Amino acid sequence: MKKTLTILGFLAVVPAGVALADDDCFVPMADWQPRDAVALLAEENGWMVRRIKIDDGCYEIDGRDAEGRRIEVTVHPATLEVIEFEYEDEDDDGRRDQDRDRTREGGDDD
């Protein structure tokens, strides 16, 4: 009985782990589009590229959109399909800078 429960528990967890790995791109390097094609994709969308890197087998574009908001875009290396598009939150950075400046000035304004 314990073996059956153990096997059923394992089988219940394995599909969840596979689903979490869907963001990864498993494509042979020979099938990848060149980095210049990713830069062209960004240009066509009006994105200002700060950096193009490889993350989990996918291209990842860090930059800004046409309105100047920070973005992070995950692109499939073979099809150049946008897999994920995120806006980076700059509010947290601004608050951290303000807190750091307040500490340098000698503490809170209480």
Image (tube, rainbow, N blue to C red):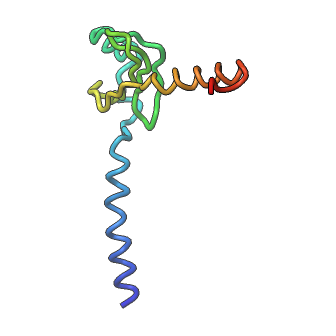
Q: Is residue 57 above or below residue 71?
A: below
Q: Residue furthest bottom?
A: 1
Indicate left or right for 29 with 83 as reference: right
| Residue depicted at x 45% and y 22% | 90
Q: Is residue 69 above or below residue 79?
A: above
Q: Is residue 79 above or below residue 27?
A: above
Residue in front for this viewpoint, 1 or 105: 105
Residue 10 image-quadrant placement:
bottom left
| Residue depicted at x 36% and y 74% | 9
Residue in front for this viewpoint, 95 or 48: 95
Residue 72 placed where, x, y %? Answer: 40, 25
> In this figure, what is the number of numbered marks?
0
Indicate left or right for 36 with 50 as reference: left
Residue in front for this viewpoint, 52 or 106: 106
Residue 28 placed where, x, y %? Answer: 39, 35
| Residue depicted at x 42% and y 16% | 63
Residue in front for this viewpoint, 100 or 26: 100
Residue 96 placed where, x, y %? Answer: 57, 26
